[in-house]
Image (spheres, coloured by chain):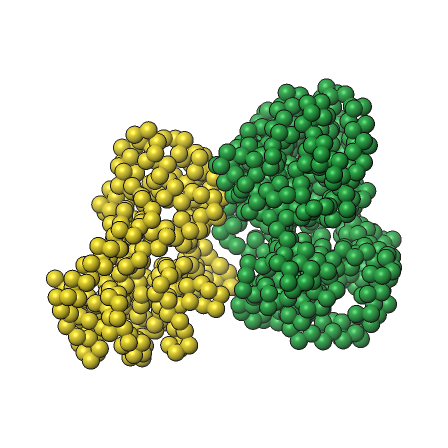
Chain colours: A yellow, B green
Amino acid sequence: MTDKYVLKKDHLLPLLRKLGKSHRLIAPLRNRHGDTLFTEIDNLDKVRIDLDNQPQNSLKRFFFPQQEVLFTYNNPDPASYHFEPVEEESGPALYFGVRPCDLSAILYMDVVFLKDAKDPHYLHKRQNSILVGLNCNNPFANCFCNATRNGPFIDFGFDLQLTDLGDRFLVECDRSRGQEIISQWQQFFSAAGDKDVKAQYQAFLEARGKFRLQVHLDLAARKLADDQVPESVWEELSMRCQDCGGCAYICPTCTCFTIRDQPTSDNDGERIRGWDACTFSGFTLMAGDHNPVDRQMRGIEKRFRHKLQFDVKKDSRPSCVGCGRCVNICFGGTDIVRFINMTCCENT
Amino acid sequence: MAGLATTFGSGAMTNSINEIENAQVILVSGSNTSEAHPQVARRIFTAVDRGARLIVIDPRRTLMARRADIHLAIRPGTDIPLLNAMMRIILDESLADDLFIEMRTENFYGLRDMLFRIDLAETAALTGVDLASIRAAAQLYGRAQKAVICYCLGITQHVCGTGNVQSIANLAMMTGNVEKEDTGVDPLRGQNNVQGACDMGALPNVFPSYQQVDIDDYREKFERAWHVSLPAQPGLTLMEMTHGGKDGQLKAMFIMGENPMLSDPVIARVEETLDNLDFLMVADIFLTETARRAHVVLPAASFAEKTGTFTNSERRVQMVRRVIPPLGQSRTDADIIMDLSARLGYAMDYESPAEIMEEISMLAPIYGGMQHDRLENSWGMQWPCWDRSHGGTPFLHKYYFTRGKGRFIPVVHEPPAELPDDDYPFLLITGRIYHQYHTGTMSRQSALLSREAGEALLQLHPDDGLRLGVRSGNLVRMRSRRGEVQVKVQLTDAVKAGEVYTTFHFSEMPVNRLTISAKDHFSQCPEYKICAVHLAKV
C-alpha cells in the first residue's frame, strides 16, 4: 500500500517552481498553434501547462531520441580507428503530467533497454528522471488503455502519481525518489483522508465508463496466438498501409532502431542510432536484394504480431499501451484498433 | 493547365480533396495515386469503403489499379481514343446529361459529330483494351450522380497532353459531372507549391492570377504598381530556355529550386545550353547537379526557415511559419530576390512576408481576400477568394464555368512522337516512386528513405526478362536514340510485356538522357511518358 497525500491545486505551480530549481521540467504544454506536446519548460510563468488534452507526442524521444549519436570515430590513416564515446550531459529531469499509458510505455522501454545488456544512453537518462504521473479521469476519444489493462488509473511504476479531485490532487508515491520529494517539500503535502481515497475511487469508476472505443484486444491476441487471423486481414491492411511509418514513430513503445555511420569529414564520423519502423521494406531487406517480406501483402504483419503476440508470449502482456495515438495519426486506416476490429469481426 | 483553361476557364482542381470521399464513382487516369499522392489515395480508399466504384486507366498495374473495380490497362498514349470510345458509348446508351449540356456548355454538336464518326471497334483496338471493359467503365461513370476524375502526369506528359485533358473535360461535361460538390475534374499537383507558383505568374504568358501579359489593361495595372514598364510579349517556356543549345537566346539564367540537369528531357541538350550561358546562378538548399555547373550558387533556406504561404492542389493557400532561423549563410528566397533586385538598381522594400502578401492580394484578384492575418489561425483558404468578406471557394464553377459556358473541344488521336520499332523495341515510361521526391535533392539526404529506395530500378515484365536472359537485380544497358544508361532490373508483372518503367530520381541513372524532347504544342510539356528504347544484358 502506497502512502497517500493531498496537494492543493493552487500549490502545484509553486511546487513545480521549487522542483524546477534542481531539475529540467518537461510537461504537456499548449503551444501557440494550439498543439499540446511534451516540451521542456524554459520559463514556468510563460507557458501553458495543458492537462486537458492528450500530448501528441509520448515521452519516447526524451529517453530514446529519434537520432542519437552513440559515439564518434576517426581514422587518420587506413590502419587505425579511434572511437570516442559521447558523454551523456543531460542533468536530472522531472516529467510532469505523465499519463498511465506513457508511464507504462516507459516501463516497457526499461525492459527493452535495461533488462539484459544495459544501454548506457538510455540508462543515464532514465536514472536522471523523475516521473510525476496523472491518472486519466477523462479518457480521450481514441484511448483504449482499459483494453490493454494499464489505465485509466495506474498504481505502480511512478515516482509520484496525481489524481485530479477537483480542487486538489490526491498524491501517491511508489518509488523512493517520490518519497524524497514529499519529505523535502513537506509544506505542500498533507496526509490524505478517507474521503480523498473514496473520491479517487469514484473518479476511477467514472473514468472506466467513459471510453468511446470498444477494443477486444485480448480476443485479437488469442486469435494471433492460435494462428486464426485470416490472410485477407493482413493483405487488406498491408495494401492500404501508406508506408509513412507514422505509427511506429508516434508509438510510445515502438523501439526498433537502425544504426548508421554518418561521415562528418574525410576522416571523422559519427555512429547514429535512429528510429526505424518494421513496416518499412528496408527493415527486412537482405543482401542481394532479397526480402523475405512482401510489403504490399504482409508489410504490416510484424507490427501487430510483435505487440499482441510475441510480447504477450515473452512478457505476458501486450506492448500496446492503448494510447490511441496511432489511431489519430494513421491516414491509411491501418492502425491497431482497425486490425483488432477486423480480426475479431471475421468469422470466429 | 491549357486543357482545362480552354474548356472550363480555370486550370485547377475543381473539387476539394476531402470531397473525393463522397464521390460515387472515381475515375483515376494517369496517376499512381498511392505513391505520388498518398493523401488523395487515402480519400479514394475511404470512398471505396463507403461503396464508391473505382475505375483506373493506367498502362501499369499500380496499387490503385489492383484495388479498382475496372482497370483499363491502355496502350500508352491512347487516352484520347479510350475517352472518345467511352463518350460514344455514353451517347449511344443515352447516358449523356442533355439538360446540363444545354444549360452550361457550348459546342456540343462539334463533339457529337466527331464521336458519331468514330468506329467503336477500331478505336477500342487502338487502346489495346477490350471493348466490353470500356463499355463497363462508360456505363459506370455515365450513370453516376456524383463522379470525380483524378488525373496526373500520365495524362499531361504527352505530345497530346492538352488534348487528353480536353477529352477528360468533355467526358465530365457531357455527363454533367462538374460544377457541384463531390463531383468534378481534379488534376493532382505534384509539388507542395506548384499551384502557387502558377498562381503567382511563374508561367511565360501571365502575371499573377492568370492575367495575360499581352492584354494592355492587365499589364498597365502591374506597371503602375511596380513603376516599371513590362514586356507585352510572353516569355520563353522551360524547354525553350533549357534546350536552346549553343544558339540559345539566353545569355544568363537564374534558377531557383529546380534541377533541370536531372529533370528535363535530353539532358545532353540541357548541359550544352547551360554550359554556353555567359552566366548561370542557382539558388537551392543543396548543391544539385545543376548548381554544380553554376558560376554563383546561393544557399537558400528550407521550408522550416521561412514564413510565407504554400498553395496546394485544391487551391488551398496555407501559412508556413519559420521555426528556426536560416542555417549558415542561407537566406530565404524572398531575401535573395530582394537583395538581388536592390543591387540591380530596383529597391524592393518589404518589411515582412505579410507585406508581400498584401501586395499579392491587391494585384491578384483570386487572392483578393487572403492576407496573413486571415490565414494564420486556420487550415488556409481556397481561391478564388475575392475580398476580406469572402470565405474562399471549396469547389469551382458553381452556377457557371469560369469562362462562361464550358466549351466542348473535340479531339482525335495523336500518336506519340516515338513508338517502339525493330531497333528500339521497348516502350519506356518514366515516373516517380513513393520514397523519393523529384530529383532527390532533398529526399536523398535521408538515410532511411535511401534504404527504402536507394537506386533506380527498371520494371520489366518476366516474359521480357526471359527473352533478354535477365533476372531481378541484373544490370541492363538501356539505350534510346538520344543516350544510354545502365540500370538494374526488377521483374514484375505490374508492367505489360514490351513496356518498361523507371524513375528519374537518381543522378546515377539519369533516365532523362534517353527521354524525348517532343512536346505538347499548347502547354509545351515534354512527352516524358513515352519513348522507344533498346535493352541489352550487361
Residue B392 located left or right of residue B517: left
Quarter of the image with the C terminus of chain B is top right
Residue A294 located left or right of residue B524: left
The residue under the point 74% across, 74% down is: B348
Residue B400 located left or right of residue A177: right
Please tell me in which quadrant of the rendered image residue B344 appears: bottom right
Between B482 and B333, the one lying in front of the other is B333
Q: Is residue B136 above or below residue A44?
A: above
Between B73 and B481, the one lying in front of the other is B73
The residue under the point 33% across, 29% down is: A347
Residue A85 in percent (x, y) is at 37, 66
Between B371 and A341, the one lying in front of the other is B371
Residue A106 located left or right of residue B421: left
The residue under the point 74% across, 57% down is: B209
Total numbered labels placed on residues in the image: 0
Please tell me in which quadrant of the rendered image residue A50 appears: bottom left
Residue B346 in percent (x, y) is at 79, 74
Residue A264 in percent (x, y) is at 51, 64
The residue under the point 79% across, 52% down is: B237
Between B495 and A180, the one lying in front of the other is A180
Residue B426 in percent (x, y) is at 69, 30
Q: Is residue A313 visible?
A: yes
Please tell me in which quadrant of the rendered image residue B30 appears: top right
Q: Is residue A86 visible?
A: no
Q: Is residue B427 above or below residue A82?
A: above
